Image: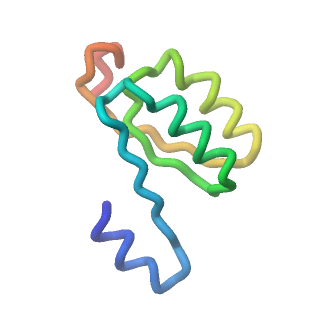
């Protein structure tokens, strides 16, 4: 993803990389910060799907597109 971000940077697309220390720890706070910063879209691995669901719904209502990529986290309900 970082390689692709460098490729499209010349087109005015900026990738903001916001890792969390551990999947499912701090991701709701990081997500809220990104939405409030005015981003147009978010790509994430949902380590805490239950905590993120209302935030994702709220972001979509604000016009922020959200793409979730799969994980094998036990909290993610087996989504792969």
Residue under the point 61% across and 37% down? 32
Residue under the point 58% across and 53% down? 41
> Would you say 77 lies left or right of 9 here?
left
> Would you say 58 lies left or right of 69 here?
right
Q: Give the position of the N terminus as an image quadrant.
A: bottom left
Q: Position of residue 45 (x, y in %)?
A: 37, 36
Identify which residue, 19 or 67, lies in the foreground.
19
Q: Position of residue 27 (x, y in %)?
A: 45, 32
Q: How many marks?
A: 0
Using the image, determine if residue 72 lies above or below residue 17. above
> Would you say 79 lies left or right of 29 here?
left
Using the image, determine if residue 61 lies above or below residue 5. above
Identify which residue, 37 or 58, lies in the foreground.
37
State the colouring used for the structure image.
rainbow
Using the image, determine if residue 74 lies above or below residue 69. above
Q: Position of residue 51 (x, y in %)?
A: 53, 18
Corner quadrant of residue 69: top left
Corner quadrant of residue 35: top right
Q: Position of residue 28 (x, y in %)?
A: 52, 29
């Amino acid at each position: 993803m970082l390689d692709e971000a460098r490729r499209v940077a010349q087109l005015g697309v900026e990738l903001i990389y916001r890792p969390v220390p551990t999947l499912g720890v701090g991701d709701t706070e990081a997500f809220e910060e990104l939405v409030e910063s005015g981003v147009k879209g978010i790509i994430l691995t949902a380590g805490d799907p239950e905590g993120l669901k209302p935030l994702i719904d709220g972001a979509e209502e604000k016009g922020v597109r959200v793409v979730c990529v799969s994980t094998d986290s036990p909290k993610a309900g087996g989504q792969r």
